[in-house]
Image (spheres, rainbow, N blue to C red):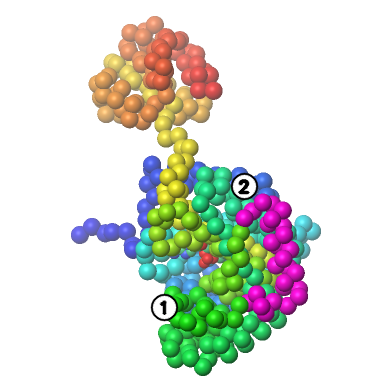
Amino acid sequence: MSIDIPRGTQDILPGTVEKWQYIEQKAREICRAFRYQEIRTPMFEHTELFKRGVGDTTDVVQKEMYTFEDRGGRSITLRPEGTAAVVRSFVENKMFGNPTQPIKLFYTGPMFRYERPQAGRFRQFVQFGVEAIGSNDPSIDAEVLSLVMNFYQSLGLKKLKLVLNSLGDTESRMAHRDALINHFKPRINEFCSDCQNRLETNPLRILDCKKDRNHELMKTAPSILDYLNDYSKEYFEKVQQYLTDLHIPFEVDANLVRGLDYYNHTAFEVMSEAEGFGAITTLCGGGRYNGLSEQIGGPEAPGIGFALSIERLLAALEAESVELPIEQGIDCYVVTLGDKAKDKSVSLVNDLRLSGVAAEKDYQDKKVKAQFKAADRLSAKYVAVLGDDELEQNVINVKNMETGEQEEVSLSSFVSYVKEKLL
Ligand code: HAM
């Protein structure tokens, strides 16, 4: 019996992987422009980090983590997200001591969540995320949002909606929490068992329940925006003002609740509005997490960031019929006729490759016609034909496959000729 790929994972094969590379390259480019530097943290961490960081009562921690005991008896978890680990690294490497603050970091890499696989939901998925740690300035919230919106737009996406909310500071959140408990408590027995548990542990999460979303109490639930204290209100207004200054359209949705516990003040999601995108329309999520550093034993270090998955980004590109400008073809295919020419092609192709020309040859003793066909399949821009006769005269025939133009060049100038033509 053959062994299949695990549920919720995928192979990314040649032909598709080029899209991933292109997207990753665009992510690097925009991060460079915004001065976000790459960080690479391990793919597994101590389980405690996510319990404390992401939050004990979240679905991610309670239901979705890949947790196991290693041979040393430690509880280890495959990372379900990147923020907790980046903040851990910020603390552990004392980045708070760096004179240039905030520390601005980005990452790309696989994350793992034991979720029910469906379109747009995988058990291993790749996130691109950024974190700016060490500043409480609302302009950095706007900067992070500008980065992500411009990233999506640079790839050609148009049907996007940025939804924004403020969860306020601790004081505002506590006031809202009390109001939520008072609101739901009298009729909590009409809600699912998860919501009943959430009432005391994390009532805000009730608002995000998929099962009870149509309950009448949901529509009349107290809005966080009515409980923001002056500082939180001013902060949120400033973020909105900056977004307007940057010409970034957004909608405020007081019901936007994020699935992870570390958020306060700005919380946001980017949705796809493309027709036929499917049930899960959230492309990106993020927000501010002042207090997360202290939560995992570090000093005060307010932060904000986002993460998006490449899988959902690709689905959005497809839904909007955006073709990425990807070149799949090779530069030059060397066709040979005769044994001596075939032997010579080994070093010719090697010389081309070492000078940066993507070159290929035949390895299967194909006839000339079949070699041309192979060159065509690889979308070769140039085909160089070398027969034993040409070899004797130290020349080679180079054909431009687009124009059909053909030229005989000396073998000694072959590589530089092809290179020049490709410029
Ligand atoms: P999150 O909302 O859990 O936030 O995930 C962010 C994004 O990751 C989602 O919007 C979605 O694009 C993608 N994603 C999540 N789960 C899956 C899945 N099972 N399959 C495919 N894609 C998925 C975070 O992870 C936070 N760390 C974001 C953040 C960074 N907040 C502040 N800084």
Instruction: Give how far across and how far down residue 229 sits, in percent.
Output: 73, 78
Please rate how many residues cluster around mark 2, counting C-alpha atoms within 10 Å: few if below 14, some from 14 to 19, many from 20: some
Left or right: where 328 falls relative to 227: left
Give whichever of 32, 88 is nearer the camera. Answer: 32
Give whichever of 42, 381 is nearer the camera. Answer: 381
Residue 243 part of the magenta segment = yes
Q: Which residues are magenta?
A: 224-249
Instruction: Give how far across and how far down residue 293 sits, in percent.
Output: 67, 72
Identify residue for label 2: 30
Q: Residue at x 55, y 57 (%)?
A: 161
Dominant SS of magenta comes to helix
Q: Residue at x 58, y 90 (%)?
A: 182
Q: Quadrant of the N terminus?
A: bottom left
Identify residue for label 1: 211
User: Can you name the residue that lies furthest to the top here?
Assistant: 393
Q: In the image, is residue 114 above or below residue 145?
A: below
Q: Name the element at disc 1.
A: loop
